[in-house]
Amino acid sequence: MSTPAENTDTASSHLTIQSPVATDASAVHALIARCPPLDHNSLYCNLLQCSDFADTCSIARLDGDVVGFVSGYRPPAEPHVLFIWQVAVDAVARGRALARRLITDILARPACAGVTMLHTTVTPSNQASRAMFTRLAAELGASVEVSPRFDRHTHLADHAESEELFAIGPFDRKLIAQEQEESS
């Protein structure tokens, strides 16, 4: 049986999910560039995600190539929350529920033992992310509350669309463990 930090796709023995390492940063940077409309962070930001924040990030490889990445962190003022910063899934890996699997991989780790809420921000136009997070909430038996978070004028200097907060939870941590067992 695989551990939460290293799941193997049973449909394709060449798809693995695990914590990233620092040497993954450039591949993550390239993946995000292939996944519009995601914001392009600096390579250094991706390096920090893959090193200092590896416990709350997850990477997927298909035949050795990076095809999925989720970055997240636990806000210091809200230790019961995992904030999902970015979700990137390459076109070649879509249709495998990979985003959900990457997120539940993170939630199953010891670093997220006290997490009962999932937060993320999504633009109104990103229908794929909105649908994925709504499905994830249903799978976790949790409610979703959507509220304004960052205004395009006030916070983003009109350089990007407004972001809405998706607050998912509270959820039953037993469902996370069950998901991991089914994935292994």
Image (spheres, grey):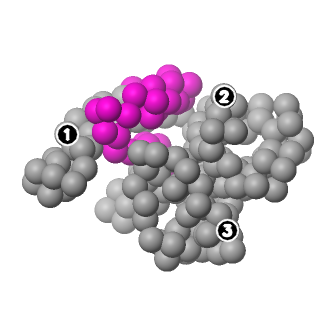
Residue at image coords 34%, 44%: 121
Amino acid bearing label 1: Pro
Q: Amino acid at mark 2?
A: Gly
Give the crowd class for mark 1: few <14, some 14-19, many >=20 residues within 10 Å: few
- Whether 153 is drawn above or below 77: the answer is above
Horizontal arrangement in the rendering, residue 29 relative to residue 92 (left or right): left
Q: CA distance from mark 3 to mark 1?
A: 33 Å
Relative to the observer, which residue lies in front, 45 or 114? 45
Image coordinates of residue 26 in percent, x first then y, are 62, 69
| Residue occupying image coordinates x 60% and y 44% | 89
Residue 54 visible to the viewer: no
Q: Position of residue 107 (x, y in %)?
A: 58, 48
Question: Magenta segment range?
Answer: 115-143
Q: Which residue is mark 2?
A: 95
Q: Nearer the viewer, mark 3 or mark 1?
A: 3
Between tags 1 and 2, which lies in front? 2
Residue 6 on image: x %, y %: 78, 53
Kindly identify which residue carries mark 1: 148
| Quadrant including the N terminus | top right
